[in-house]
Image (cartoon, helix red, strand yellow):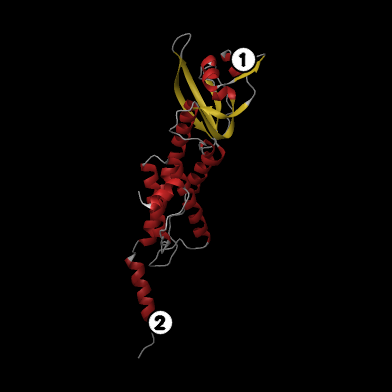
């Protein structure tokens, strides 16, 4: 292994001795950013992909304010603008989170099956039936795990406090406490925090340590909602870059004619 690779392995945050050139124009920057994002999402690095997209959005917003979103030939502003509806929806999922509406069907007396789940941006104002429920959806940014996603640990640490009743609800209490070490000592005896399902559902405490299945399910739901708006933004940025480079022959000829008129006669 080379010294550079060995140093990188020992310190993953160390920068390599590589020079990077800056894009010469805004269209080139958009293409490069989208390309980096495509690489991340292709290798399932979804959160890194979203961070690149957010950086791109911030740059383009500033470019619009600065009057830089223009066609490179005509120097006129392009028609396509940043889709702020899609941007705001995506950033809401990323920064604020929302609510998850779930509807169940009774299979038998002991089993219910999920037949619908919908991401909501605000708490609904309709009355819920016994087969419907609303749970809090953490911000997607908060679901960035502090632990290795590929580890086999039962719990994963996230960046937002979650009600225990929502984090632990799908687990059998005895196994949850045994594997997760959710217990306390009383006269030399370990007492589990939860002995029944009712104990879990009546908990008023919050936790940042969530079971792996909670992490997997809620990350997938948040990503599913984010991606609906992210795909709109990706196409939106691509279209903006194309318009910046598009040759409008009529406009170019008009500019050339005007330049010729301004030239002094011999």
Say which element carries label 2: helix
| Residue on which the image places disc 2 | 262
Query: Could you tell me residue 105's position as x and y percent?
Result: 46, 16
How many badges with numbers are in the image? 2
Residue nearest the observer in this picture, 13 or 234 = 13
Asked if disc 2 and disc 1 are in contact, CB closer than 8 Å, the reply is no
What residue is shown at x 50% (from left), y 35% (from top)? 147
148, above or below 163, in the image: below
What residue is shown at x 37% (from left), y 46% (from top)? 39
Residue farthest top in this picture: 109
Residue farthest left in this picture: 249
Snapshot quadrant of residue 19: bottom left
Q: Nearer the viewer, mark 2 or mark 1?
A: 1
Quadrant (top left, top right, bottom left, bottom right) of the C terminus: bottom left
Q: CA distance from mark 2 to mark 1?
A: 91 Å
Query: Could you tell me residue 121's position as x and y percent?
Result: 54, 35
What's the mark number on residue 191?
Answer: 1
Q: Is residue 72 left or right of residue 134?
A: left
19, above or below 257, in the image: above
What's the mark number on residue 129?
Answer: none
Residue farthest bottom in this picture: 266
Query: Could you tell me residue 141's position as x and y percent?
Result: 52, 40
What residue is shown at x 32% (from left), y 67% (from top)? 249
Query: Could you tell me residue 203's position as x and y percent?
Result: 63, 20
Q: Residues within 10 Å of mark 1 (few under 14, many from 20)?
A: some
Say which element carries label 1: strand
Mark earlier in primary sequence (2, 1): 1
Q: Residues within 10 Å of mark 2 (few under 14, many from 20)?
A: few
What residue is shown at x 36% (from left), y 61% (from top)? 245
207, above or below 200, in the image: below
Residue nearest the observer in this picture, 62 or 157 = 157
């Amino acid at each position: 292994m080379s010294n550079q690779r060995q140093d990188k392995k020992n310190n993953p945050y160390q920068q390599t001795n590589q020079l990077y050139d800056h894009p010469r124009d805004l269209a080139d920057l958009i293409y490069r950013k989208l390309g980096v994002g495509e690489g991340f999402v292709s290798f399932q690095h979804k959160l890194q992909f979203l961070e690149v997209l957010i950086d791109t959005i911030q740059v383009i917003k500033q470019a619009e304010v600065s009057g830089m979103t223009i066609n490179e030939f005509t120097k006129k502003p392009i028609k396509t603008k940043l889709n702020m509806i899609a941007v705001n929806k995506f950033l809401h999922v990323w920064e604020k989170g929302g609510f998850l509406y779930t509807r169940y069907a009774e299979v038998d007396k002991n089993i219910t099956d999920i037949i619908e789940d919908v991401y909501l941006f605000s708490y609904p104002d309709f009355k819920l039936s016994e087969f419907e429920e609303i749970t809090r959806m953490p911000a997607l940014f908060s679901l960035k795990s502090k632990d290795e996603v590929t580890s086999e640990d039962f719990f994963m640490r996230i960046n937002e406090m979650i009600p225990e009743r929502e984090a632990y609800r799908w687990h059998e209490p005895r196994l949850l406490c045994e594997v997760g070490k959710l217990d306390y000592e009383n006269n030399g005896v370990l007492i589990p925090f939860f002995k029944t399902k009712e104990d879990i559902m009546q908990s008023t405490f919050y936790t940042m340590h969530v079971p792996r299945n909670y992490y997997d399910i809620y990350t997938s739901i948040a990503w599913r909602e984010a991606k609906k708006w992210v795909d709109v933004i990706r196409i939106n940025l691509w279209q903006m870059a194309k318009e910046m480079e598009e040759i409008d022959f009529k406009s170019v000829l008009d500019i050339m004619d005007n330049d010729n008129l301004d030239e002094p006669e011999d």
